[in-house]
Image (spheres, rainbow, N blue to C red):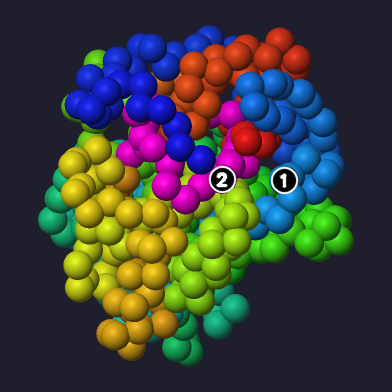
Amino acid sequence: MNIPNEVGAAGPQNIAIQDYDYPLPDERIAKFPLPERDASKLLVYRKGSISETVFRNLAEELPQGAVLLFNDSRVIHARLRFTTPAGRMVEIFCLEPASPAEYQMNLSSREPVIWHCLVGNNRHWKGGLLQSEVVTPAGPVTLSAERLERREGAFEVRFSWQAPTPISFGEVLAAAGALPLPPYLHRDSEPDDEDRYQTIYARQEGSVAAPTAGLHFTERVFEDLDKRGVERLFVTLHVGAGTFKPVKSETIGEHHMHEETVIVNRDTIARIAEVLEQGRPVIPVGTTSMRVLESLYWHGLTAAEATTLHIRQWTPYEPHENEAPAVEVLRQFLRRLDKAGQSFVEGQTQVLIAPGYRFRIAGGLITNFHQPRSTLLLLIAAWAGQDWRRMYDYALANDFRFLSYGDGSLLL
């Protein structure tokens, strides 16, 4: 589906973020999930019209032949709390692995690892090691944190641990850390969040925030999708803390978009190409899946022989003389992977989807309702144009719940 360029050939850099603001009362932010995942409301936007149903009826609302694309990343216990020798609390928020830089290698390591971290109450950490005693399935463990260099607003922190039997960092983190709920919930995680702040299909550990559009799915919804022949595909994007980063600049051109790690199997790319060739819509579940899907196009178009994905923030808005239909671009991508003998592609995407963006692959979107003045809201406006205001006005007037634990929408 091609969306007209609303901001001209210059791209979205001059978009004023104040134009993507709206009043969101605190009482409309869902602080806790509903008792049943699929009982949430579902706003349906189709050809400019707005209606509503409940999420468990999703299968009935999807176009014939639709394929859904899910992000199977799993949220890790990224918040660690230590006490300094002076009795001060320091919180370390693990953002992404630095050494080893690959998530699974890092989390499975039984040797010291390094992470990029935010440090709360950093002024109280005068230096040296911080230590915490942790009870794990392998027995009591002493976890140590050593602050290293500061890089781009975050610290490198080396973690080491002493245990009676060998244990991985992922296991230590699971026992020592806490689930990192979004800051706008203004509460600590509770036992119920351990289940409800994960999708039922989460498999690949690495996110510090849930891909929340997927929180509404249940086995019952999957069964209904199966009965209607709705195929499911999976990709991985490890959601970073940057997803909550507000746009503080007056225009989008001054905003630095965060990077996030992407992993996609070769067979998934091949299936997407086949589905598009058949004229069927690929509908991403969540803005993270949308960013992966569109990043595949830009990687296929611009990467030449490179097999490691790296999409910059403004790549889609630069002139590209070799633009081609998505199927052709994905086929080129597959030939490149096959030549390199790769069964998957991994890398980073920084892509910013804002009004003026023309969607190359996506045929719809399932998503929640997003914060004012956020890059996520810009993505919705890129898809629906100025109708984003109509949708959000409707949701506010009809008791929809907002943000991570809130209700959902299907945008066609």
Q: Is residue 114 above or below residue 216?
A: below
Quarter of the image that includes the C terminus: top right
Question: Pointer 1: what residue?
Answer: 63
Where is residue 187? Give x, y as percent.
58, 34
Residue drawn at x 40%, y 21% is 373
Q: Report the magenta stretch's main SS.
A: loop
Q: Give the class, few, some or many, for how many residues have Cα within 10 Å of label 2's Cα (few <14, many ≥20).
A: many
Residue drawn at x 80%, y 48% is 59
Q: Quadrant of residue 53?
A: top right
Q: Amino acid at mark 1?
A: Pro
Residue drawn at x 49%, y 32% is 383
Instruction: Give residue 186's mark.
Output: none
Is residue 163 part of the magenta span, yes or no? no
Where is residue 139? Give x, y as percent.
55, 80
What range is drawn magenta here?
352-371
Q: Quadrant of residue 203?
A: bottom right
Front residue of 409 and 96: 409
Q: Is residue 147 above or below residue 246?
A: below
Whether residue 343 sits left or right of residue 392 in the image: it is: left
Residues tagged 1 and 2 counted as in contact (Cβ below 8 A): yes
Question: Pointer 2: what residue?
Answer: 363
Q: Is residue 206 above or below residue 398?
A: below
Q: Earlier in the sequence, mark 1 or mark 2?
A: 1
Q: Amino acid at mark 2?
A: Gly
Q: Secondary structure at mark 1?
A: loop
Where is residue 296? Give x, y as percent.
38, 59
